[in-house]
Amino acid sequence: MDSNSDILIKFGNRVRELRKLKNLSQEELAFRADVHRTYIGMIERAEKNITLLNIEKIANALEVSINDLFNETRK
C-alpha cells in the first residue's frame, strides 16, 4: 500500500472510531452530515478520497473539530 492510501485508511479508521464512540450508525452519521448513506462506508473502507467540504460536514456531524478527525487515538 502506498502512502496516499495510508492517510485514507487512517482517516477512515478515525471516522469509524468516533462514529462508534457516539453510538451512531453509518446511516445516522450520513444523515447528520448530509451525505449519501453509502458514502460513510466508503470513507471508512478507504475507498473515497474525501473533500475538505465533506471533512467539515463529518466533523460537524460528529460534533468534533476537524483536527480531531486527524488525531489518532493513543493506545
Image: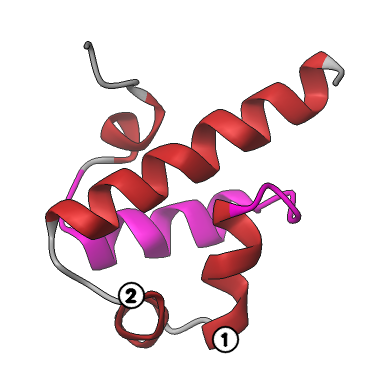
Specify whether 1 is left or right of 60: right
The x and y percentages for residue 70 are 40, 28
Quadrant containing the N terminus in the rendered view: top right
Q: Which residues are magenta?
A: 45-64
The x and y percentages for residue 56 are 41, 55
Q: CA distance from mark 2 to mark 1?
A: 10 Å
Name the foreground residue: 60 vs 20: 20
Specify whether 50 is left or right of 65: right
Q: Which residue is mark 2?
A: 29
For the residue carrying disc 1, how many other residues have a C-alpha within 10 Å: few (<14), some (14-19), or many (20+)? few
What is the image's colouring?
secondary structure
At horizontal 68% and vertical 47% (from top left) the residue drawn is 46
Look at the picture and state if 11 lies above or below 54. above
Inspect the image, locate mark 2, and give the three-letter code of the amino acid beneath it: Leu
Residue 65 forms part of the magenta stretch = no
Look at the picture and state if 37 lies above or below 71. below
Q: Quadrant of residue 9?
A: top right
